[in-house]
Image (cartoon, rainbow, N blue to C red):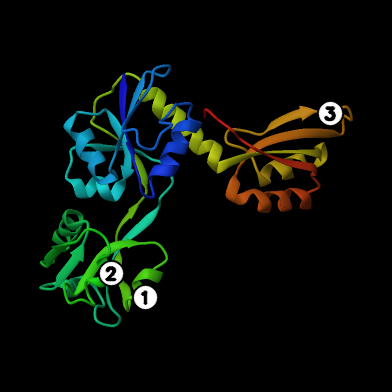
């Protein structure tokens, strides 16, 4: 039975649970459950703190898990990233009092507060910068104002929280993170199926189907707008001068593609959501 670690709370938990459900797995029905068994799919779920998941998977106690790339790298666990899952994206950056720091090299000898001290220490070492790391669990933005640190290293989404504390980011990003599927390195039974199903969920989330009718004389121009993953599906219509076309299009590009298709003469353009896919 495949043993999967799933975040029990936080920003990763809800989407991770949704992806697994869309992939056909039966998760827990009670938020208080720590373990849930999906006998039909021969899977056992363990609901754990996101920060602990890499440790459990890396130890070999569990086969795979879903956590953040930043948490994986900070854990020091031998677990490895299998694939990105495309949600909970964030950027990990340095920040300090506005105008104080212009580059990471200026952190030499400074105090840097972070919840990810292992990750930050490794990054600074790769740049030849020696600084004192101050480990805090959450709310590191207040560390500079309270005199605990000279700078912070934290997850940055919009930067609004940092600006509210009088801080600004500087230097290149330490890391671009997202939710990832991790493994202990062994090909456990059911792992290939899990990966294939999650890939299908990602495709279904990121793509739509676009159907339209087009005069055959304009078919090449229309296909140049959207050619599909492999090739467009072209079907004959009752009127031999017209054809029906179906293609997969990235969801984010849907309206631009529809506009371009209309410009080359496409008619009856219809967009359909994809529930599941295998590519």
Q: Position of residue 199 (x, y in %)?
A: 46, 33
Q: Nearer the viewer, mark 3 or mark 1?
A: 1
Q: Determine whether, in the image, residue 169 is placed left or right of residue 230.
A: left
> Looking at the image, do the residues carrying marks 3 and 1 touch, with CB atoms under 8 Å apart?
no
Crowding around mark 3 (Cα neighbors within 10 Å: few <14, some 14 to 19, many 20+) is: few
Per the image, the residue denoted by label 3 is 237
> What distance separates the C-alpha of mark 3 from that of mark 1?
60 Å
Question: Is residue 122 among the parts visible in the rendering?
Answer: yes
Regarding mark 2 in the picture, which secondary structure is present there? Answer: helix
> What distance separates the C-alpha of mark 2 from that of mark 3?
62 Å
Residue 164 image label: 1
Q: Nearer the viewer, residue 196 or 134?
A: 134
Regarding mark 3 in the picture, which secondary structure is present there? Answer: loop
> Looking at the image, do the residues carrying marks 2 and 1 touch, with CB atoms under 8 Å apart?
yes
Q: Position of residue 31 (x, y in %)?
A: 39, 37
> What distance separates the C-alpha of mark 2 from that of mark 1?
9 Å
Residue 141 image label: 2
Q: Quadrant of the N terminus?
A: top left
Counting residues from the N terminus, which is met first, the one under dot 3 or under dot 1?
Answer: 1
Crowding around mark 2 (Cα neighbors within 10 Å: few <14, some 14 to 19, many 20+) is: many
């Amino acid at each position: 039975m495949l043993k999967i670690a799933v975040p029990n709370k936080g920003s990763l938990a809800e989407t991770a649970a949704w992806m697994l459900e869309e992939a056909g797995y039966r998760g827990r029905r009670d938020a208080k459950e720590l373990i849930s068994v999906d006998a039909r799919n021969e899977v056992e779920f363990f609901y754990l703190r996101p920060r602990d998941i890499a440790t459990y998977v890396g130890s070999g106690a569990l086969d795979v898990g879903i956590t953040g790339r930043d948490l994986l790298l900070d854990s020091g666990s031998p677990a490895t990233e299998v694939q990105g899952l495309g949600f909970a994206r964030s950027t990990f950056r340095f920040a300090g009092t506005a105008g104080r720091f212009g580059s990471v090299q200026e952190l030499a000898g400074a105090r840097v507060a972070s919840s990810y001290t292992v990750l930050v220490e490794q990054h600074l070492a790769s740049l030849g910068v020696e600084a004192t790391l101050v480990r805090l669990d959450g709310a590191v933005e207040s560390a500079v104002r309270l005199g605990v640190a000279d700078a912070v290293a934290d997850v940055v989404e919009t930067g609004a929280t940092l600006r509210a504390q009088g801080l600004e980011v500087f230097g290149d990003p330490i890391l671009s993170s997202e939710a990832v599927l991790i493994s202990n390195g062994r090909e456990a039974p059911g792992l290939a199926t899990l990966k294939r199903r999650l890939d299908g969920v990602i495709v279904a989330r990121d793509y739509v189907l676009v159907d339209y009718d087009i005069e055959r004389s304009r078919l090449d121009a229309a296909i140049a707008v959207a050619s599909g993953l492999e090739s467009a599906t072209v079907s004959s219509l009752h009127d031999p001068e017209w054809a029906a076309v179906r293609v997969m299009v990235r969801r984010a590009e849907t309206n631009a593609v529809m506009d371009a298709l209309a410009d080359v003469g496409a008619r009856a353009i219809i967009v359909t959501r994809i529930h599941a896919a295998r590519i």
